[in-house]
Image: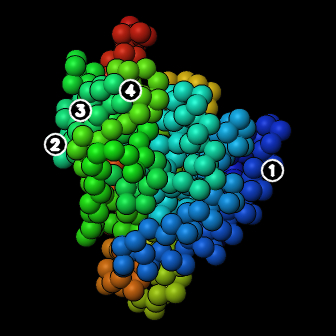
Amino acid sequence: MPFFGLDQKLALDRLHHADPEHADLIGFLEGTLDRFCTERVAPGAAKQDEEEWFDEETFRALGDTGYLALAFGEDVGGMAAPFSYAVSGLESLAKANAGFALGVAIHGTCTDGIYRFGSPELRQRYVPQLVTGRRIGCFALTEPDSGSDARAMRTSFHQDGDDFVLNGTKYWITNGPSADVFFVMARDARDGAISAFVVERGWQGQFELQPIKDKMGVRGSNTAMLIFENYRVPRQQLVGERGRGFSYAMHMLNGGRVTIGAWSTGVAQGAYEKLLRYAHERRLFGKKLMELDNTRRELSEMLIGIHAGRMLTYCAAYDKTRGLDIAREAAIAKVAASEHAVFCGERAIEIAGGYGYARESRIERHLRDALLARIGEGANELLKIMVIPRVIEESFERERTPDLW
């Protein structure tokens, strides 16, 4: 099976069949990007997982294909394509190599933040290089004591002349060791309001990166703790308005949750396809594993959830392109797709038995990778007790339910 499959094409057809650029964009995904996944991304997945390293050379080559530029405007060298094409491509990358694809996803979140909220000067200085892969970006929100509760961040800044001075620690920052561009959130020492900054290395003060190793999954991505001590950031590096950073972060997380939905769907698809192949090769009780009712039922349940997660994710991406509020849609897509990715990883191992549990099968990696999606870009438990219930209540107050019928 190709890395960009027929089901992805059909899903995009449902949303974009009338768009004038649709055929060209599909051609890019099923041609250039699929070949890139086959030749560059998938072959290194097992080795990068085992050795725990991010392939920066392949990342920059991905930039050369044009993929990183898909969803950004032509004013910064992008293709101005709907976001749904970009998330479909991310699904393919995640199927090929989930760790590598996670780095691509977070790079996209950083780029989106600068593109949407940065000044024209910041956009022109950074986004053209980010969308070509010449620079790698990361999103520095999480801290040792503030993950899901992002408002509890302690990293602070104060203004000193023409500079802002950063102090604090960011934790679990994907792409940290490789990044050239850091989208950093910090709290104003003056009034506690959160602002956003585009930060680079090599400025005055101390900026230390400490790699985080020995992760359970997504080992083909790299992760770091960032430590700022009196690190001076030029005033022009402020993103948007002072004090609006938390709002920007929430918008970025909505887009990030859509990418995690696509990423999870790719991970689930990988587990499903590896089990499907094994089920056609393994014999049990005189039959192919595929001929047993239990295997057929499990594969059916896996495929049903993959289709559901894909459509939820692509539709949320489409709504983002249309400028709609996607807080509910992004959260639902992320929860549904990530939970199903874990299900697919578990069931693929269970049906494949001892072979599936062994690293040699390359099946067990999908479960280790999938578990990250329950946590990243807002833990599923938080989304189910805070974010989604909030929009449920808003919807009820706005629309009410009819009288009992």
Q: Amino acid at mark 1?
A: Asp
Q: Are marks 4 and 3 in contact (CB under 8 Å)?
A: no
Q: Amino acid at mark 2?
A: Asp
Q: Amino acid at mark 4?
A: Asp
Q: Quadrant of the C terminus?
A: top left
Lower sequence index among marks 4 and 2: 2
Q: Quadrant of residue 247?
A: top left
Q: Of circles 1 and 4, which is in front?
A: 4
Q: Quadrant of residue 213?
A: bottom left
Is 81 located above or below residue 361 in the figure?
above
Q: Quadrant of residue 60?
A: bottom right
Q: Residue at x 54, y 27 (%)?
A: 119
Lower sequence index among marks 2 and 1: 1
**Cα–Cα span, label 3 and label 2:** 14 Å
Q: Residue at x 52, y 87 (%)?
A: 281
Across and down, in percent, residue 63 comes to 63, 58
Q: Does the image show residue 333?
A: no
Residue under pointer 3:
156
Q: Are marks 3 and 1 in contact (CB under 8 Å)?
A: no
Lower sequence index among marks 4 and 3: 3
Across and down, in percent, residue 104 comes to 51, 55
Q: Residues within 10 Å of mark 2 (few under 14, many from 20)?
A: some
Residue under pointer 4:
162
Q: Secondary structure at mark 3?
A: strand
Is 34 located above or below residue 196 in the figure?
below
Q: Amino acid at mark 3?
A: Ser
Residue under pointer 2:
145
